[in-house]
Image (cartoon, helix red, strand yellow):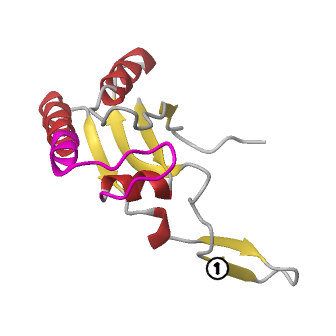
Amino acid sequence: MKYMIIIQGTQADYDAMGGTSAPGEPAWTKQDVQAMVGFMQKLNEDLAASGELVDGQGLTAPSDGGLVTAGEDGRPVVSKDGYGVEEPVIAGFWVLQCKDFERAAQIAARIHQCPVPEGATNPPVIVRPIGDEPPVA
């Protein structure tokens, strides 16, 4: 079965990784970033070797993205203001082919052990099964 493993972050998290501290988020050093990248590279290599990795991607900062909603007239409105500033958004994901939920959760637990600087946010890692087909009403 396929599972999506999701990590979240806010703009403050990305700013901290770029070296700018924010309330509750210490600035990351170059060594902190290298430790995180090295951890993720090893994880991805291990998942590829086990045949469980389907895809995995890190996403750019929320300030690079936007939000599409409906305006009062029903037409789409694209906004970049405030997206991902306060609320967590998807920062990265893996699509895995695992034998069961327990195995996907084991991998998520490993991801949660990714090194972060002391005092930095370490948000939960989300495990979601990917449905084979849409539900039928």
Identify which residue, 97 or 70, lies in the foreground. 70
Tell whether position 67 is magenta: no
Quadrant where the C terminus is found in the figure: top right
Q: Position of residue 116 (x, y in %)?
A: 31, 36
What kind of element bears circle 1?
strand
Reading the image, the residue beneath label 1 is 78
Name the side, left or right, on which 26 lies relative to 132: left
Quadrant where the N terminus is found in the figure: top left
Position of residue 12 relative to residue 111, above or below, is below
In the orientation shown, which residue stands out farthest toward the right? Answer: 72
Residue at figure coordinates x 51%, y 39% from the top left? 132
In the orientation shown, which residue stands out farthest toward the top? Answer: 102
Residue at figure coordinates x 22%, y 41% from the top left? 36
Q: Position of residue 135 (x, y in %)?
A: 68, 41
Name the side, left or right, on which 39 lies relative to 127: left
User: Looking at the magenta stretch, what is its main secondary structure?
Assistant: loop
Tell whether position 30 is magenta: yes
Question: Which span of residues is magenta-colored?
Answer: 19-36
Name the side, left or right, on which 62 lies relative to 30: right
Q: Position of residue 16 (x, y in %)?
A: 37, 53
Query: Label 1 is placed on what type of residue?
Result: Val
Find residue 119 and report its image quarter: top left
Position of residue 19 relative to residue 48, above or below, is below
Position of residue 65 relative to residue 87, above or below, is below
Identify which residue, 27 or 104, lies in the foreground. 27
Identify which residue, 108 or 130, lies in the foreground. 108
Find residue 4 and report its image quarter: top left
Residue at figure coordinates x 64%, y 77% from the top left? 79
Residue at figure coordinates x 65%, y 72% from the top left? 68
Q: Position of residue 94 (x, y in %)?
A: 35, 42
